[in-house]
Every structure is written in structure tokens, then in C-alpha cells.
Amino acid sequence: MKNNKLYMQMIFIVSLIAMLGSLYFSEVRLYEPCEMCWYQRILMYPIVLLSFIGIIKNDINAGLYVRVMSGIGILVSTYHYALQKIPALGDSANACMGVSCTVQYINWAGFITIPLLALTAFIIIFILSFFIKKD
């Protein structure tokens, strides 16, 4: 179905932008990723590859894999954002290795942080994955 390819292309674009954004923050701006950021990357980066393969092979089953990974990504990103914004949770985050998970390298408009950007991408991908239907 033609719409399936369009939705997979949209998933690819969103995940690619998220991946390039995370690489920009770590490689250009030199923000060291915390442990939770690494977990989000581990979930986001394969979505780029899975959606690209889904587009090339016209495989709608890739939508299921993307849905599962983005669903887990939503949970991880939500928890990470809560660590940053809820002080009671943030106090328990000192167990993170290296950079603390409560560090807010960016805080645009008082609430937009890197985990919120990742959460937004995961939600968009998750919703788009439901539009991919079998013929």
C-alpha cells in the first residue's frame, strides 16, 4: 500500500533527525551523554535502520519492530525527563555512572530538555507506526 511507504518514510525522517540531533549535541556541542541518554540512543538509532530497510524492502513488519522500540523509548524518555524535572526523583539519580542523569544541558523555555526532545520523537514514531496496515 502506498500510504505504508509514506508513513515509513516519515518514521525514517523523524528518527534520522533525532539521531543527528543527539550526535550534534554530543559531537559538536561536546555534551557528554548520561547513562539514560545512552539507553535512548540504543533505542533510537536502530529505528533509523529498521525504517530504512522497511522502505527499501517494502516490509510492513518493520512497523511492528519500530512500534516496540519506540514504545520502550517513550518509557525511558519519560523517566529521564521526570528525573530532571521532579526533584524527589532527581535525588535518587546520583547512582548514574559518569554524568548525572539530572544534568540539563539545554532548558529552552524552562521545560524543553534533551530527554523531552527524544520523548517527542518517540511519540511521533509510535503514533505513525499504528498507521502502517497490512494490505
Image (spheres, helix red, strand yellow):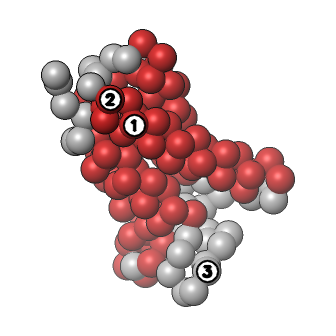
Who's the residue at 35% across and 55% down the image?
A: 123
Disc 3 crowd, CA 10 A, few/some/many (<14, 14-19, 20+):
few
Q: Is residue 77 above or below residue 27?
A: below
Q: Residue at x 32, y 29 (%)?
A: 2
Amino acid type at image mark 1? Leu
Check disc 2: other Cα within 10 Å, few if <14, some if 14-19, many if 20+. few
Q: Secondary structure at mark 1?
A: helix
What residue occupies the far bottom of the structure in this picture?
Answer: 110
Residue 19 visible? The answer is yes
What residue is shown at x 49% (from left), y 56% (from top)?
A: 118
Secondary structure at numbered mark 2: helix
| Total numbered circles | 3
User: Would you place residue 122 above or below residue 129 in this image?
Assistant: below
Q: Is residue 35 left or right of residue 10?
A: right
Task: Write down the residue under mark 1.
Answer: 6
Judge from the rendering whether residue 6 lies leftward or rightward of residue 28; answer left or right.
left
The residue that label 3 is drawn on is 108
Figure quadrant of residue 114? bottom right
State which mark lies toward you, 3 or 1: 1
Does 83 sit left or right of 71 as displayed?
right
Q: Is residue 64 depicted above or below 26 in this figure?
A: above
Give whichever of 12, 121 is nearer the camera: 12
Contact (CB < 8 A) between labels 2 and 1?
yes
Question: Can residue 68 be seen in this snapshot?
Answer: no
User: Badge 2 is on which residue?
Assistant: 2
Q: Say what amino acid the circle numbered 3 marks.
A: Trp
Residue 46 x %, y %? 49, 29
